[in-house]
Structure formats: structure tokens, C-alpha cells
Image (cartoon, helix red, strand yellow):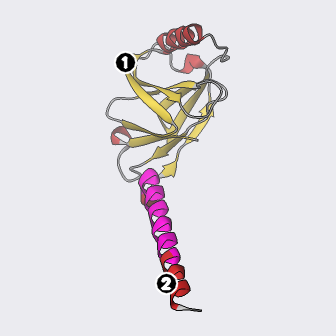
Amino acid sequence: MNSMNMKTAWMTAGALAAALAILLLAGCATTGGGSATALTARQVDGAALGSQRLDTIRVETFGPNIQQLYGYFLYRDGITVNVTGRITGKNLGRMTLAEVRQDYQRLLRENMIYGGNLVIREVLRGGMVVGYSANMPALNYTVWNMTPDAPAANATLQLTFP
């Protein structure tokens, strides 16, 4: 192999190694470096929330989807929630499930789409409910526990789609 081909081969190998390192670091940034765990969610009747007012984030997909998908995450005081991936989050303040459903119906009307009824799931961390997701049936994001050693009341959660 002549010196020019050898130099090109080493440059290519170096570029591939750098790209791999960047991808690995990006993966660690979105999952907490391996310490994060996905939380369990189970479908419940919306009556489980009653008329509780909880902190609420509306999530919307973006990107190559034919239509945007909408969902909500309702959570208790003291919990921090971050949104990553192909969704954006908008803090809506404290809302009841009835208010969330009204906001969802407004979005459907404004965007002239049919999204079906919201699917309500309670999100569990260590057997305790830390929040509720209320999503279009087609939207399934993952809720990650970013602080597994912190008490449930002070948890940091991350919503990630897909």
C-alpha cells in the first residue's frame, strides 16, 4: 500500500472513530449515562384523577409525520419533567383532566384532525404514582426516571419520543 492510500485509510478510520464517539456521547446525554430507567405505565380510567389539579405539560411531535400527535403529562408538585426526542413540550400550568380534555378537543378542531379519545395511563416509580399521561392513541412516549436514588417527591423525569 503506498503512503497516500495509507494516509487516507488512517484519516477515514479517525473520522469514523470520532463519529462513533459523538454518537455514544449523544446517547448518554439523552438517557442519563446509563443510570436512567424507563418507568412503568398502566392504562387507567380517567376517574382515577378525579378533579385533581396537577402540573401539566402538552407534548407535540414534529418531523416527518403526516400529522402532529398530541399528548399531555400531568405530574405532582416537586417533580421536574424534561422533554427530548422528536417532541416539544409546553408548560400549561396546573390543570384537571377535564381541562386537559377541553384543550385536546380545541387542538383537534383548530387543526381539523381526528385523533380519537385520549388514552390515560398512570406512571409508576417504585410502586407510587408520579404522574399521568393522556395521549392520542398513536402517541407513545417513554417516561424515564433520571434520578433513581432521589425520593419520589423530588424525581426528575424525562419524556422521550420515539
Q: Is residue 35 visible?
A: no
Q: Name the magenta segment's main secondary structure.
A: helix
Residue 158 image-quadrant placement: top left
Q: Is residue 157 left or right of residue 49?
A: left
Q: Which is nearer the eye, 66 or 75?
A: 66
User: Marks 1 and 2: CB-CB under 8 Å?
Assistant: no
Query: At 35% from the left edge and 36% from the top edge, which residue is drawn?
Result: 79
Query: Could you say whether the residue bearing mark 2 is in a helix, strand or loop?
Result: helix
As drawn, 45 above or below 37: above
Query: At 55% from the left edge and 8% from the top edge, which residue is drawn?
Result: 110
> Which residue in the structure is indicated by mark 2?
7
Residue 40 image-quadrant placement: top right
Give residue 5's position: percent from left, percent from top: 55, 84
Q: Residues within 10 Å of mark 2 (few under 14, many from 20)?
A: few
Q: Which is nearer the eye, 9 or 69?
A: 9
Q: Is residue 66 visible?
A: yes
Residue 15 forms part of the magenta stretch: yes
Give residue 125's position: percent from left, percent from top: 48, 43
As drawn, 59 above or below 160: above
Q: Which is nearer the eye, 62 or 4?
A: 4
Q: Residues in magenta? A: 12-32
Considering the image in quadrants, where does the C terminus appear?
top right
- Three-letter residue code for mark 2: Lys
> Which residue in the structure is indicated by mark 1?
94
- Three-letter residue code for mark 1: Arg
Query: Could you say whether the residue bearing mark 1 is in a helix, strand or loop?
Result: strand
